Image: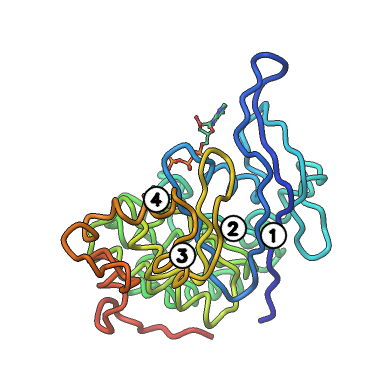
Amino acid sequence: MSASGITIQGLTLSFGRGDAEKQILRGIDLDVPAGQITGLAGESGSGKTMTGLAVCGLLPAGANVGGSIRFEDVELTQLKQRAMNEYRGAKIAMIFQDPTASLHPMLTIEAQLIDHYRHHTGASKKVAKQRALEMLGLVAVPSPEAALRKYPHQFSGGQLQRIAIASALMCEPSVLIADEPTTALDVTVQAGILRLLRTLCDELGIAIILVTHDLGVMSALADTIAVMRMGEIVEHGSRFQVITDPQHPYTRALIEALPDAADAPDAAHSPDTSSAANAANASDAVPTEGGLS
Ligand SMILES: Nc1ncnc2c1ncn2[C@@H]1O[C@H](COP(=O)(O)OP(=O)(O)OP(=O)(O)O)[C@@H](O)[C@H]1O
């Protein structure tokens, strides 16, 4: 599959007008290449989620957007809602901290995966079901046939996040925005999801934007890390450079604040700093049955 990336230039975002205007993003430049995980790190309120939502065209009502978000020669900021709906869910997909946010509680997994796919592709029920089974296998949900007949509340948080990822992958998106995808999960489950995202990126060539406040997770997974502060990117480099040789005082402060940093003076030389992140790198952290095609 050949995937495309996203190029963000001078992205601004504000809410309100005049004296009441609140500036959220202050000119973001960011390249999100295909086949790479681009991490967005930074403190709460720095604008990470809003950047992801802007790429998806999911900003709250009243958002004033400026600058450019380009995808496959299309200027996404100029698209009408209807046209953006065609991109979202098909070519650009998003998963959230709470997987139930993207799954309807009253519908079976089959209904939600298949309806979504058929809406975007016009495929028959049979073809859509085959695709759903394939995607559930890909993300290593056990017994995909039985899983299709169940409802979201019948799964654990980790399995639900896998199903949300399967749903996001149904239409072969080029871009996946993962906003704190493991924050609500316990550490061993986190590791499996992180490894899954890495595999999807490497084997399907998807461009992933990973939003997380957890620099440990970021340092285990992202190819490059962009550090955000108050609506700006203050530093963007390879994960190794950002973690081991941070240039901006704010990045240095973030790294020093990592729990392990105080105990291990040379922690900065090891890019993987959290237990979830370390587990994510362990070869037995997650079953990989299902394979990637
Ligand atoms: N609908 C809205 N109207 C006005 N301001 C908003 C709205 N939604 C979010 N904001 C503000 O936008 C800013 C950036 O929020 P955002 O959620 O992107 O931060 P974040 O870096 O993802 O932080 P967190 O990790 O806490 O989610 C915050 O100051 C937030 O209060």
**SS at circle 2:** strand
N-term mark: 1 or 3: 1
For residue 242, the mark is 3
- Residue for badge 4: 213
Residue depth check, mark 1 versus mark 3: number of the one nearer the observer: 3
Pinpoint residue 207: horizontal percent, then vertical percent: 60, 69
* Ligand 1 neighbours mark 3 (CB distance < 8 Å): no
Instruction: Report if the CB atoms under discs 2 and 3 are less than 8 Å apart.
Output: no
- Relative placement, left or right, of 18 versus 35 is right
Q: Residues within 10 Å of mark 2 (few under 14, many from 20)?
A: many
> What amino acid is labelled 4 in the image?
His
* Ligand 1 neighbours mark 4 (CB distance < 8 Å): yes
Name the residue: 26% across, 80% down. Answer: 282
Instruction: Report if the CB atoms under discs 4 and 1 are less than 8 Å apart.
Output: no
N-term mark: 4 or 2: 2
| Tally of numbered tags | 4
Q: CA distance from mark 4 to mark 1?
A: 33 Å
Q: CA distance from mark 4 to mark 2?
A: 20 Å
Q: CA distance from mark 1 to mark 3?
A: 39 Å
Name the residue: 65% across, 61% down. Answer: 118
**SS at circle 1:** helix
> What amino acid is labelled 3 in the image?
Val
Q: CA distance from mark 2 to mark 3?
A: 27 Å
For residue 246, the mark is none
